[in-house]
């Protein structure tokens, strides 16, 4: 959604060159505004020519194109809530000022040439002739129509974007910039209304009614179409629609219905609570005031300095002590102890689980627990709360389990972390007891991830920075020299012993196998690719050396041996693919 800006008026074309300013109010305006246009001929000042032009004004308009109307609010035929201002929107951003014969004054105010008037259905009669716009007849036009002295305030331009207004207006795409007329009338509830778009200048009103005859003089003046003291009046209607209002319901309407009522501070928010004829020998208190949500809290109630009713009046000590003794009595009573008269079950002790106390403490203990259980008014509220918990126990338990689920998951994470910490300690204890050689062999799988200086342990071993070859830290070496393996039992030497001897230089690991000098191999017997790297067909088709060459006989012997050897050397001559079950053996690729 783009940002929108609102401007007090807009003009386009030659209308921007008007020099006559609008005095606003009820002042008349010239009906015809001359506009001097100077044209240079041939680029020389001596060839200039001037001509007087007259722009169209309100007297030239007898109707508007319905396609210029973009939207009306309220929509035609709807019932809306009162309290809103009716409006109409036009496609052209300069439409309300298109035929105003003046420019804006120093206060940036410019009256539009038409306005929106909203009248009750009983205030206006609309006739719709076939040959011209509709005609509205009013008996008290000055009292029911908007004040034209303020018409400049009820027309605005809406343009998108930011920056200079003229640039925003020129760069706006079609449909983005628009003009809007408001009617300042406050709507009443349950009323039918008629909205009318009418001209605001007298010459425009007469032109719309077809009563403007003859040529308009260049010095003619046009006054407002009506004033506040105008009586009966006929107006041409350029556009109209009807709507109605419903019941009031907005915030302003609700506030206006509020009425001040004098409240009795002794009775408001309180009702009498009868504390009489109590069981178990409790003394009567008569009537105590039970406070509601509107009751103010006294300082004693905030500090808990005294057990009192909701009005701050201390309760009788005989009642509170007797009630405390009853609440602290075990029921059913122990053998040989008579139960309190009239009670089968003990009175509930509210809040004792939260306080962690099985009994009501004496004076000086938990003040809130004493007030909750020894004040009859507070016990009423606590009993209602317990009843709500009883009625909604399933929902409350489900909510509690939903909250406990997060706690259970958090505890599970803590227990998993504790298990991992304990396992790490045991593993570290076992590894710490090993010597360096055994530790290097056991930790070889993680050697690529353990740093040793600027490199990893595996990088140090494999990169030539250690006497120990990488093979001695592998799993195959450990498995071959395991203590209970064949080599370990026969030699009594373990992998750690050999690793220690190689590391301190006692033993030296021989390098890779090399061919002794002077040894004749298959590959050295021929030129080019070795015999072992050729297929049997390539060996048979190979070009032998000349027959008179001393290598001819040796080449034939080597070739025969190489052809036989190819069948037992998969690396040199892989065997043909085995056929799938159900497919005949083939020597070339097939769908099988």
Image: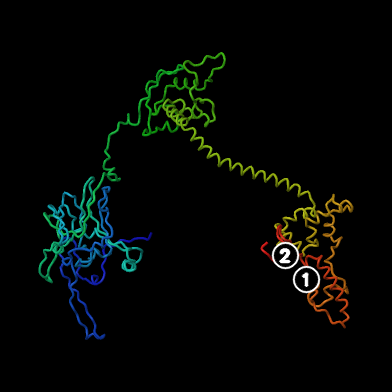
Residue 572, position as x, y percentages in the image: 78, 68
Do the numbered discs 1 and 2 sit on residues whose CB atoms are within 8 Å?
A: no
Residue 280, position as x, y percentages in the image: 46, 17
Q: Say left or right for 418 vs 271.
A: right
Residue 68, position as x, y percentages in the image: 26, 63
Q: Quadrant of the N terminus?
A: bottom left
Q: Quadrant of the C terminus?
A: bottom right
- Mark 1 or mark 2: which is in front? 2
Residue drawn at point x = 42 percent, y = 31 percent: 301
Q: Is residue 82 above or below residue 133?
A: above
Task: Using the rendered view, name the quadrant where residue 94 is placed.
Answer: bottom left
Name the secondary structure under disc 2: loop
Residue drawn at point x = 81 percent, y = 53 percent: 479
Using a 10 Å C-alpha cutoff, classify the residue at mark 1 as few (fewer than 14 neighbours), some (14 to 19) or many (20 or more): some
Q: Say left or right for 494 vs 72.
A: right
C-alpha distance separating marks 1 and 2: 19 Å
Name the secondary structure under disc 1: loop
Taking the image as drawn, is residue 27 in sight? Answer: no
Q: Say left or right for 506 vs 314.
A: right
């Amino acid at each position: 959604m783009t940002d929108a800006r609102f401007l007090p008026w807009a003009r386009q074309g030659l209308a921007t060159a008007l020099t006559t300013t609008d005095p606003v109010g009820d002042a008349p305006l010239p009906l015809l505004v001359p506009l001097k246009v100077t044209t240079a001929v041939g680029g020389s000042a001596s060839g200039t020519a001037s001509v007087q032009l007259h722009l169209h004004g309100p007297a030239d308009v007898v109707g508007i194109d319905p396609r210029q109307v973009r939207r009306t609010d309220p929509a035609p035929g709807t019932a809306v809530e009162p309290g809103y201002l009716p409006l109409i929107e036009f496609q052209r951003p300069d439409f309300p000022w298109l035929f105003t014969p003046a420019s804006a004054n120093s206060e940036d105010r410019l009256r539009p040439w038409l306005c929106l008037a909203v009248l009750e259905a009983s205030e206006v009669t609309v006739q719709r002739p076939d040959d011209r716009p509709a005609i509205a007849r009013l008996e008290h036009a000055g009292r029911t129509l908007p004040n034209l002295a303020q018409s400049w305030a009820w027309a605005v331009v809406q343009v998108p974007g930011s920056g200079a207004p003229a640039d925003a207006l020129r760069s706006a795409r079609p449909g983005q910039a628009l003009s809007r007329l408001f009617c300042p009338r406050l709507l009443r509830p349950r009323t039918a209304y008629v909205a009318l778009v009418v001209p605001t200048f007298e010459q425009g009103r007469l032109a719309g009614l077809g009563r403007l005859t003859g040529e308009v003089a260049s010095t003619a003046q046009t006054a407002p179409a009506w004033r506040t003291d105008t009586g009966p009046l006929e107006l041409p209607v350029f556009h109209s629609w009807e709507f109605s209002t419903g019941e009031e319901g907005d915030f302003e309407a609700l506030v206006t219905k509020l009425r001040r009522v004098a409240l009795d501070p002794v009775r408001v928010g309180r009702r009498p609570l009868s504390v009489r004829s109590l069981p178990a020998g409790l003394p009567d208190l008569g009537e105590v005031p039970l406070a509601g949500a509107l009751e103010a809290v006294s300082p004693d109630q905030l500090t808990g300095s005294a057990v009192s009713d909701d009005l701050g009046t201390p309760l009788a000590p005989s009642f509170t002590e007797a009630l405390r003794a009853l609440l602290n009595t075990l029921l059913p009573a122990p053998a040989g102890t008579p139960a309190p008269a009239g009670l089968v079950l003990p009175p509930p002790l509210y809040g004792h689980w939260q306080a962690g106390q099985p009994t009501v403490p004496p004076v000086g203990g938990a003040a809130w627990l004493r007030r909750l259980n020894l004040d009859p008014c507070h016990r009423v509220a606590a009993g209602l709360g317990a009843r709500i918990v009883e009625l909604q126990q399933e929902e409350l338990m489900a909510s509690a389990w939903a909250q406990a689920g997060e706690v259970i998951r958090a505890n599970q994470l803590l227990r998993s972390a504790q298990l991992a910490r304990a396992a790490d300690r045991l593993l570290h204890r076992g590894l710490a007891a090993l010597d360096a050689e055994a530790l290097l062999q056991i930790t070889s799988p993680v050697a690529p991830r353990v740093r040793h200086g600027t490199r990893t342990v595996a990088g140090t071993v494999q990169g030539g920075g250690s006497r120990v070859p990488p093979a001695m830290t592998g799993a195959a070496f450990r498995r071959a020299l395991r203590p209970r393996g064949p080599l370990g039992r026969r030699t009594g030497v373990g992998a750690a012993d050999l690793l220690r001897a190689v590391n301190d230089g006692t033993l030296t690991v021989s390098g890779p196998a090399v061919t002794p000098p002077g040894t004749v191999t298959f590959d050295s017997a021929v030129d080019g690719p070795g015999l072992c790297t050729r297929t049997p067909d390539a060996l048979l088709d190979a070009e032998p050396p000349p027959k008179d060459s001393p290598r001819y006989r040796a080449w034939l012997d080597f070739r025969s041996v190489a052809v036989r050897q190819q069948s037992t050397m998969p690396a040199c001559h892989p065997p043909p693919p085995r056929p799938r079950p159900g497919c005949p053996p083939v020597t070339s690729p097939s769908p099988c």
